[in-house]
Image (cartoon, rainbow, N blue to C red):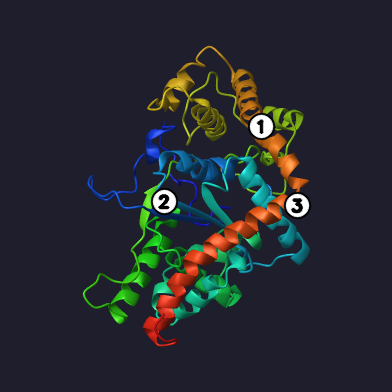
């Protein structure tokens, strides 16, 4: 779901740090107090599941509180990126509203953050075309995520079963559109998981190439080189097959917990989660992926609920040890209760927002205007620099 952030691929024990993770992450030096611009995008896939929330969205929400009030937060629903894979037109249109409603319900504040539909701001595509004319095929061939996307939609067993004969040009070049998304706002920072670092590096490379091709007199290069915000992204696995990530594409709906699920449905799905027959509760992602997945979810929700200790750490190993004399049933009950309570208000907000299409439209239109005000200045300067228009 998250375009510029994704789940960590490692399975090592981790500490959940609920508040301090992002505190003044923006500054490259202690004396740097200049405002930052944070950009991130999300696919319009509709109602998010638990993995989407813990992997990206909750980090966006935290950034609203931990970044400086002088920093600009820009969150985009990336409709153009969605078209790189087959879409049902009616479903795509509705999913854009469902995604916006979900983000607002989960805590994105449209007064603090700019929330908009990428496809409503034409500057993204204009800058994308200009940047494609600077980007070599060799750089794009080294971007390998398209194979994973094709493998998913074709239900392939591995990426080895797909080749570039199945590849459309949009999917091949979408990393350049990602770069345009970021550079259109002169973003200083982008929240990313480890599997998105490659794409952010491409954005930096393209920015450097532009800056060398079109140098400014007595100034640094025109484009800011965006830096990564390494966000804590617990890897949430399928409840039915804990060797796989939680995904909407999985055929069994009980494998995932959706924001719109009722409390009864959440309890039922967690109770049916695949674990193992080993006695006791321990955190061992390799040997006990099901149990470890439940512990990860519980630790994540407890960290989000911790509002009294700004620097508290929830150690997942210690959490597992607290279940030394308990079984999987006890753990599942606590996990279900934590999700139900943690999502109680967001679920209520989601239902209210889904019924208020006028409000959603207004929020997205306001976001479009604010986003366009920034990106149009960038594009105007680019057009002037490369010779497509006169001085602004």
Please state the horizontal and vertical placement of residue 215, each as a whole percent of the image: 28, 78
Q: Is residue 152 visible?
A: yes
State how many labels appear: 3
The residue at which mark 1 appears reads as 345
First in residue order: circle 2 vs circle 1: 2
First in residue order: circle 1 vs circle 3: 1
Q: Which callout, 2 or 3, points to the residue nearer the camera?
A: 3
Q: Quadrant of the C terminus?
A: bottom left
Relative height, residue 323 to residue 313 (above, below):
above
Counting other residues with Cα less than 10 Å from the Cα at mark 1, is it few (<14), some (14-19), or many (20 or more)? Answer: few
Evaluate if marks 1 and 3 touch, with contact meaning CB atoms under 8 Å apart: no
Please state the horizontal and vertical placement of residue 84, each as a whole percent of the image: 61, 69
First in residue order: circle 2 vs circle 3: 2
Depth check: give the residue in front, 161 or 171: 171
Q: Residue furthest front?
A: 392
The residue at which mark 2 appears reads as 194
Q: Quadrant of residue 185?
A: bottom left
Tell me if 208 is positioned left or right of 351 in this view: left
Relative height, residue 131 to residue 29 (above, below):
below
Relative height, residue 80 to residue 252 (above, below):
below
């Amino acid at each position: 779901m998250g375009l510029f952030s994704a789940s960590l691929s490692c399975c090592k024990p981790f500490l959940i740090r609920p508040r301090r993770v992002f505190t003044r992450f923006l500054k490259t030096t202690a004396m740097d107090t200049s405002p930052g611009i944070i950009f991130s995008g999300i696919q319009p896939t509709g109602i998010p599941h638990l993995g989407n929330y813990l992997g990206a969205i909750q980090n966006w929400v935290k950034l609203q509180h931990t970044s400086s009030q002088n920093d600009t937060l820009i969150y985009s629903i990336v409709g153009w990126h969605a078209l790189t894979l087959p879409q049902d037109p009616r479903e795509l249109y509705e999913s854009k509203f469902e995604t916006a409603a979900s983000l607002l319900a989960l805590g994105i504040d449209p007064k603090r953050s700019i929330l908009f539909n990428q496809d409503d701001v034409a500057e993204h595509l204009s800058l994308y075309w200009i940047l494609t004319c600077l980007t070599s095929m060799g750089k794009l061939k080294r971007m390998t995520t398209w194979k994973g996307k094709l493998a998913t939609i074709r239900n392939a067993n591995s990426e080895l079963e797909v080749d570039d004969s199945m590849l459309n040009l949009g999917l091949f070049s979408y990393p350049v559109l990602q770069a345009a998304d970021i550079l259109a706002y002169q973003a200083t920072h982008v929240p990313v998981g480890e599997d998105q670092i490659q794409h952010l590096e491409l954005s930096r490379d393209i920015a450097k190439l532009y800056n060398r091709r079109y140098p400014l007199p007595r100034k640094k290069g025109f484009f800011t080189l965006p830096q990564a915000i390494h966000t804590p992204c617990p890897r949430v696995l399928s409840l039915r097959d804990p060797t796989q990530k939680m995904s909407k594409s999985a055929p069994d709906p009980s494998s995932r917990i959706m924001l719109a699920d009722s409390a009864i449905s959440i309890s039922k799905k967690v109770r049916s989660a695949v674990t193992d027959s080993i006695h006791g509760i321990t955190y061992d992602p390799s040997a006990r992926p099901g149990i470890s997945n439940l512990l990860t979810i519980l630790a994540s929700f407890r960290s989000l609920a911790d509002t009294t200790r700004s620097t508290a750490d929830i150690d997942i190993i210690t959490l597992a040890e607290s279940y030394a004399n308990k079984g999987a049933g006890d753990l599942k009950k606590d996990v279900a209760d934590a999700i139900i309570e943690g999502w109680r208000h967001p679920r209520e907000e989601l239902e209210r927002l889904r019924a208020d299409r006028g409000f959603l439209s207004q929020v997205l239109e306001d976001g479009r205007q604010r986003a366009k005000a920034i990106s149009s200045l960038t594009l105007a300067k680019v057009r002037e620099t490369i010779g497509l228009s006169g001085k602004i």
